[in-house]
């Protein structure tokens, strides 16, 4: 419980620091408004990225089941902490919800992503965003960040690190969502 509180506190502090930094400008009159990525109620951007075998994975539009898009990096401590829970939950709910790990390869390396996936035994698709275009289109501030997307392609929620029990609750809610 204490560990989770510390992780949440760190994530909140990082988000606040990023928000404050993004709000600074020498010339307030010419500063462009910050563009935001998909948020709850918005259509999730479509994309095609290669998986670890180089096979293209397409995402977008309506699907047969909801999906969790998990953006991560191999150097990210919280990513290392959450991946065992995600693996376990995918094993339990993978027939009802898709889980896709999107490595921020533009800020990582393909070798590190491959090593991470192998070391942890990731049992769901791992995609490589080497150009960083998909990551940029989702516009989030911290990793890991996950987008919970309904079968209709609409973002239901955006979350960061969660305890396994919270993840399980969110997955059940996503599955029940019409």
Image: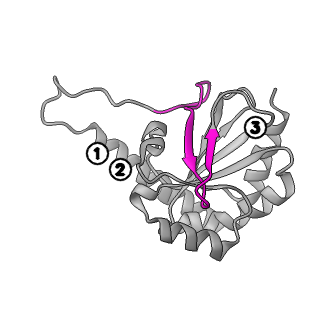
Residue 119 lies left or right of residue 103; in this view the side is right
Nearer the N terminus, badge 2 or badge 3? Answer: 2
Q: Which mark is residue 164?
A: none
Q: Is residue 76 magenta?
A: no
- Judged from the image, the secondary structure of the residue bearing numbered disc 3 is loop
Q: Residues within 10 Å of mark 2 (few under 14, many from 20)?
A: few
Quadrant in the rendering for residue 52: bottom right
Residue 17 lies left or right of residue 12; in this view the side is left
Nearer the N terminus, badge 1 or badge 3? Answer: 1
Q: Is residue 43 magenta?
A: yes
Q: Could you say where residue 38 lies in the image, as x and y percent from the top left?
A: 53, 31
Against 82, is 139 above or below?
above
Q: How far apart, in angstroms, are the residues tagged by discs 1 and 3?
A: 34 Å
Q: Residues within 10 Å of mark 1 (few under 14, many from 20)?
A: few
Q: Quadrant of the C terminus?
A: top right
Residue at x-position 43% and y-position 63%? 108
Q: Residues within 10 Å of mark 3 (few under 14, many from 20)?
A: many
- Judged from the image, the secondary structure of the residue bearing numbered disc 2 is helix
Query: Which residue in the structure is indicated by mark 3?
Result: 66
Magenta stretch, main secondary structure class: loop
Q: Are marks 1 and 2 in contact (CB under 8 Å)?
A: yes
**Comparing marks 1 and 3, which lies closer to the viewer?**
3
Q: Which mark is residue 21?
A: 1
Q: Could you say where residue 165 lies in the image, as x and y percent from the top left?
A: 77, 56
Q: Which mark is residue 17?
A: 2
Q: Are marks 1 and 3 in contact (CB under 8 Å)?
A: no
């Amino acid at each position: 419980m204490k560990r989770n509180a510390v992780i949440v506190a760190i994530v909140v502090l990082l988000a606040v620091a990023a928000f404050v930094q993004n709000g600074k400008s020498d010339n307030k009159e010419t500063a462009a408004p910050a563009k935001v990525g998909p948020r709850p109620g918005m259509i999730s951007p479509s994309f095609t990225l290669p998986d670890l075998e180089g096979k293209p994975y397409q995402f977008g539009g309506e699907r047969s089941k909801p999906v969790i898009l998990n953006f991560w990096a191999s150097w990210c401590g919280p990513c290392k902490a959450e991946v065992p829970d995600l693996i376990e939950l995918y094993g339990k709910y993978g027939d009802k919800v898709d889980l896709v790990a999107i490595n921020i390869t533009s800020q990582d390396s393909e070798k590190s992503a491959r090593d991470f996936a192998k070391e942890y035994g990731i049992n769901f698709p791992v995609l490589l965003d080497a150009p960083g275009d998909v990551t940029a289109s989702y516009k989030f501030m911290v990793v890991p960040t996950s987008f919970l997307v309904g079968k209709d392609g609409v973002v239901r929620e955006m979350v960061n690190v969660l305890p396994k029990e919270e993840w399980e609750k969110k997955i059940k809610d996503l599955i029940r969502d019409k």
